[in-house]
Amino acid sequence: MMGRKNKTLTILLMLALSVMLVIAGCGSSAGTTQEAAGADSAKVAEGTAADNSTAGTESADKEKEEATEATSGASEMVGYTPLDQLQERYDIVIIGGGGAGMTAALEAKAAGMNPVIFEKMEAAGGNTLKSSSGMNASETKFQKEQGIEDSNDLFFEETLKGGHDTNNQEMLRYFVDNSASAIDWLDSQGITLDNITITGGMKEKRTHRPTDGSAVGQYLVSGLVADVQEQGIPLFVNANVKEITQENGQANGVKVVFDGSEEKTISASAVIVATGGFGANQELIKQYRPDLEGYVTTNQPGSTGDGITMIEALGGTAVDMDQIQVHPTVNQEKSYLIGEVVRGEGGILVDKAGNRFVNEMDTRDNVTAAITKLDNRESYLIFDSGVKSRAKAIEQYAKMGLVQSGDTIEALAEEIGLPADGLKGTLDAWNESVADKKDAAFNRETGMDHDLSGAPYYAVKIGPGIHYTMGGVKINNNTEVLNTTGEAIPGLYAAGEVTGGLHGQNRIGGNSVAEIVIFGREAGVKAAEFVKANP
């Protein structure tokens, strides 16, 4: 086990380096991105002004070239498969090296298959790497050990309510009923999520995090990469799949471009699409939700909807494409998501007058709506040293310069430009509410285990940002991709944010990580069964 831990730590460090270099290399692209899992991030300004001198252009080109070379080196160090090991055929091709793709690969391998993963970016992880709060699951062994009484039925009801009763209930039932086994499976892989907190829209603590309470994304990705390597599963990066091939109506491989060079055709008996959503594709966002034009996005630049487009070309159909989640707490300057765990551990939101204005633990759409009504859509997330100690992700926010502090409430108010009497009055009233276990102002019922009385005090300025696309391709519980008549396309499977229907009109925080593991596992299992039945 010690060897596995050392290997995971090495991969963790290399992943962080890879992602930092990827972002540096993307510095001239339109759009924005973040890495909430511990890697540095950079905001990519849209409409960057042109350089005024030839020397400036040459300097930028040189920096880009150096970043590309460094990224390639980091990719090799992290252990990605070199191109000279590429084969012409695999049992299963998996498009996307995020959480869903790697989970599917591990299950396919366990079933005796020879899978391969193609990731178009310079590093594995995708949006999974940015996940912060945790993974939702009910009736888990860790909940039972900690005396948390939860049920699959309650998880189902709260998720359905959060999605405004528009969720695909058959998918949702499968999702909640298989959430505990997904936690067990991760634990068997050396990925232990036994620190449990709560996020918005829930009544029970069911958001599972790493033991130390840190952000789930980087821990999960590093663990999955280590498992993929230990199982000898080839993982190619800079592998941009352009098309899913088909013969007699059955998916039978892909066309892929490696490192921007010539296109290669790779054959397979089944294809799993795990390419993520389209939250970084401004054109698609504008097409389906023109009201969101100009919002920052928390998505990594690879989230452009490629998988949806490729599946539609094969006759697949998409659902809920206009259902795009705007996360309420995003730092606007760095397009960096501030995880729900900060509120779950006791943080509050205040306006420019220092007053609370919403139940901070309400669903994301409701909290976002409240912030949107404020002047310039600006709010401040306020917390104390106790919250900071319990929500380890705050350490990363501080490293990035997003956190402001003060030894007293009055000092914090002066630091962030809020009226001291207003902010102090708000915290005094809030602490009384916590003591009374009753929030008369906004009826908050969760995230009230601790008051905000532990100096120093902290604040992060936030506003809403595009975070997640609930819409995507239509699948059944076997993760088979369905065509326009509701029939499964033979040999074609999909899992994760590329799919639609599970979340309905609003996703509950913590459900995305659960989705990629639960349905990623199912995709690997069902694709393997298909290959065995169709040799």
Image (spheres, helix red, strand yellow):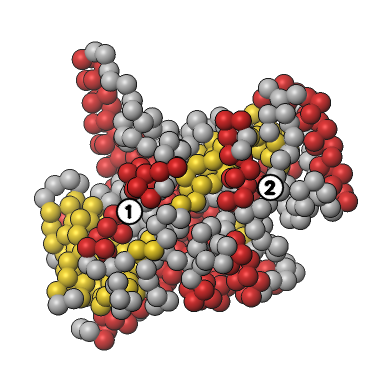
Q: Is residue 109 visible?
A: no
**201 over 62 or under it: above or below:** below
Residue closest to the eye, 377 or 424: 377
Residue 335, image x and y in percent? 48, 37
Q: Nearer the viewer, residue 248 or 33?
A: 248
N-terminal-most mark, 2 or 1: 1
- Check the image and name the residue furthest to the left: 262
Name the disc covering residue 305, or none: 1
Secondary structure, mark 1, is loop
Task: Report the disc number at residue 46.
Answer: none
Q: Which residue is painted at 26% across and 36% down in the image? A: 68
For numbered disc 2, what is the local secondary structure? loop
Residue found 83% across the figure and 42% down from its top = 431
Query: What's the amino acid at mark 1?
Result: Gly
Q: Position of residue 49 (x, y in %)?
A: 32, 21
Relative side of 297 to 150, left or right:
left
> Residue 358: x and y, percent?
70, 45
Q: Which mark is residue 360?
A: 2
Residue drawn 45% across the image and 42% down it:
291
Q: Is the residue marked by circle 2 packed among few (<14), some (14-19), or many (20+) residues within 10 Å?
A: many
Give the quadrant of the C terminus.
bottom left
Residue 338 vs residue 361, the one in the foreground: 361
Which kind of residue does numbered mark 2 sit on?
Answer: Glu
Q: Quadrant of residue 510?
A: bottom right
Q: CA distance from mark 2 to mark 1?
A: 31 Å
Q: Is residue 450 above or below residue 176?
A: above
Q: Is residue 232 left or right of residue 370?
A: left
Q: Could you say where residue 195 lies in the image, as x and y percent from the top left?
A: 64, 59
